Image (cartoon, coloured by chain):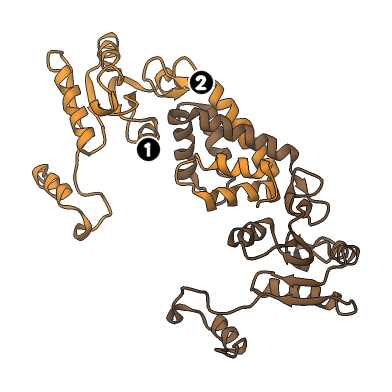
Chain colours: A orange, B brown
Amino acid sequence: MNSSPLIDQLIEAFKCLPGVGPKSAQRMTLHLLERNKHGGQKLSESLARALENVGNCSRCRTLTEEETCRICASLSRNSKICCVVESPADVFAIEQSGTFRGVYFVLMGHLSPIDGIGPEQLGIQQLLDKTQQESTEEIIIACNPNVEGDATAYFIAEQFKSLQVKVTRIAHGVPVGGELEFVDGGTLSHAFSGRKVMDNS
Amino acid sequence: MNSSPLIDQLIEAFKCLPGVGPKSAQRMTLHLLERNKHGGQKLSESLARALENVGNCSRCRTLTEEETCRICASLSRNSKICCVVESPADVFAIEQSGTFRGVYFVLMGHLSPIDGIGPEQLGIQQLLDKTQQESTEEIIIACNPNVEGDATAYFIAEQFKSLQVKVTRIAHGVPVGGELEFVDGGTLSHAFSGRKVMDNS
């Protein structure tokens, strides 16, 4: 028997978060109620506001509350180079690395016929249209390096075959800072087949 | 550069939860916006409702939205036995074990003069009054088994010396299901000094 139905409901609600089980949900609930009511208030409000206003960017499909997202709208980005990723989280990761100055296209998933996710759901036609409208010069495919991501990457490359667009895919290989000993076989074989000449000139 | 200020705000707001850093906060935000808007809505509403309505039980000080909590109000609980704990989370843990059928008193902390937490903040006077009003027969102290918890337990026991109330403390010892090899020295010495005669009669 817990002491309060509202607390039970809140614990239950916290369980919808990824990686949050009954224990963490209870800890979060009690933390906010006992020690951080202000933070809880802010969380509740931010969440309601984001859920109400955030939709998809009309150009790149990432999550934004505006018609076009801040990256698509920025004048300092090179719209001739478009990086295709599976999810907004990938955009965050690439932006945090600070290596890419082009624009994005977010598939919001990967090909998965069993779940009813085909080219239409991934907005492939929209990507083709955007490429022609913005006369994109290079499409960099950065789908996840797994079976579904590979299938999606090959499918997209196929669609662009007849167009005058260079299609590339980010390199697979040994992660920087890792130790060879702990790298899996698939990654190692990719690293070998993708080896480069060391040019010391 | 992220794609949306509202998303940035929501990520920031999630960081107020215990054990949630920037990566988890981002994952939670994107999960709710991409895949579980309904769950997010419910979370936002439950949180707002709980923050607005939940206060402390007038009898045991635990968190509840009612005047007296469900445990204090229950007729099936033995109000002659009162378990003193540090926080509502302890009430949850003891209730889940299902071993205790008495009522609680929640200190909402432990003695900590450096943080300005003295007997007044812990409601010791309220505990003494409650004990006399409800003619409690036994006070079971279940403060945490650490320095602050020990100090608090001794202090409370001291207050009850002049009254006709039995004061006990839950046993310290080797946790059930653990292995002796991995139990710390403090716990082992408690386990030895608290040893019991094995009665096979």
Q: Mark 2 points at which residue?
A: A65
Q: Name the residue under label 1.
A: A93
Q: Neighbour class for label 2 at 10 Å: few (<14), some, many (≥20)?
A: many
Q: Mark yes or no: residue B136 visible.
A: yes
Chain for mark 1? A
Specify whether A106 is left or right of B39.
left
In the rendered image, residues at marks 1 and 2 fall on the same chain = yes
- SS category of the residue bearing label 2: loop
Q: Mark yes or no: residue B1 visible.
A: no
In which image quadrant can residue B106 be found? bottom right
Residue closest to the eye, A154 or A33 = A33
A82 is higher (above) or lower (below) than B53: above
Residue closest to the eye, A172 or B13 = B13
Q: Distance between the residues labelled 1 and 2?
A: 20 Å
What's the residue type where badge 2 is placed? Glu
Residue B156: x %, y % from top left: 80, 73
Residue located 54% across and 26% down the image: A51
B76 is higher (above) or lower (below) than A162: below
